Amino acid sequence: MDTGEDLVDDGNVLPMSRVPQGMSIDASPESHHDRLRNRVVRQNAFGGPEHISIEERTAPDPGPGEALVRVHAAGLNPVDWQIPADPSVAQEFGVSVPGGYGHDLAGVVAAVGSGTSAVQVGDRVLGGARGAAIADFAIVPAGRLTLVPYAVPLNVAATLPIAARTAAAAISLLELTPDDTVLIGGAAGGVGVLAVQFAVRTGATVVATASPANHDFLRSLGAIPVSYRDGLADAVRDLGVTITAATDLQGAETARAALDLGVAAARITTIATEPIPGTIPTGGMDAPAGTIPQVLDDLAVGDVRVQISGEYPIERTAEAVARLREGHVRGKLVITTGAA
Ligand SMILES: NC(=O)c1ccc[n+]([C@@H]2O[C@H](COP(=O)([O-])OP(=O)(O)OC[C@H]3O[C@@H](n4cnc5c(N)ncnc54)[C@H](OP(=O)(O)O)[C@@H]3O)[C@@H](O)[C@H]2O)c1
């Protein structure tokens, strides 16, 4: 497991994300052969993880403005399996099948293309490479990478690109205040774990849906748990709270319950359903500027936490995807390459 402490100097956590002189990737003891070895996870046909395989290739060269990232960890998101499951979704995301896999990644810059100044070799970074993240090496536009502080392990950083931005969008658009009581549906998932924490930090009261097995976990994040099921609105009424805003992170059940409870449609955000008239569909594109650096800072000082419920070596990506697809992972699953 990547502890993120591989570049800790004499026990002191280095304050910056940059590798000190003499510790760059090029100077590491890693052999030339290992540096070029590039295991790439591929989806060979439309369908599920039964079509996932792993191939060995050589690491690509970064073009102008690009960085080659030595991937340490790649975070999984539902969209990773939703894309190859449906040709129309693949087209929407511009992904080819057969093709590569994943999006979220964190690692260390191994090389940069010409004219690239946003990052340098040795930087610890996170970012996104659609259809290419689950590999030993990935090419990412350098300007779209974010430096990761040493206090944040790379496996943790790899969970952030999609989930943190989506959670930030879903909560910030509600403009919560301490007078609010917000209902969060799908609160135990990758997006939900962060959304609950962002909502709690506004001072609002947070009521969050999950199956009973996740209720203690949601309490530990500061939320009042409630089971999702038929009659969610009644279950919320039984809590004796007055819901004033809601975000639905799993389908439309929570959004509909919130409407039933009298919440104004304009105070309901959704991320995973057909638009419901008057409510606010949203996603990572609506995240406030600076969301990822802010969450990294919060993680570094322990103001926010992520939940990693499984780490799988790259060879077991299909197994991890199959588990994610069942829809009941608490927090996130991460693929690791063994890079040190
Ligand atoms: N619009 C966007 O930009 C955007 C971005 C990210 C994600 N999404 C979408 O948003 C959804 C959530 O993403 P995610 O990453 O959080 O997914 P996820 O991590 O796979 O969510 C798993 C969680 O969902 C909970 N869950 C399953 N069925 C539920 C239900 N009927 N009601 C409430 N909770 C339920 C499970 O809790 P229990 O085990 O307790 O049931 C589990 O903890 C996905 O459909 C994803 O594709 C959209």
Image (tube, rainbow, N blue to C red):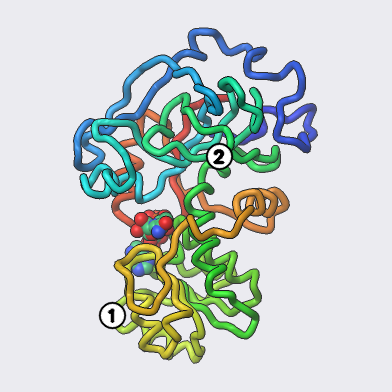
| In the image, farthest residue toward the top | 32
**Please, what is the three-letter code of the amino acid marked with disc 1?**
Asp
Residue found 67% across the figure and 33% down from its top: 5
Does label 1 or label 2 sit earlier along the sequence?
A: 2
Position of residue 280 measured from the top left corner of the image (x, y, whole percent): 42, 72
Position above or below: 230 against 303 = below
The quadrant the C terminus occupies is: top right
* Residue that label 1 marks: 230
* Residue at the image position 64 percent from the left and 33 percent from the top: 118
Q: CA distance from mark 1 to mark 2?
A: 42 Å
Of marks 1 and 2, the one in the foreground: 2
What residue is shown at x 30% (from left), y 30% (from top)?
42
> Please, what is the three-letter code of the amino acid marked with disc 2?
Arg
Give SS at disc 1.
loop
Identify residue for label 2. 144
Q: Nearest the camera: 29 or 312? A: 29
Residue 111 visible in the shown view? no
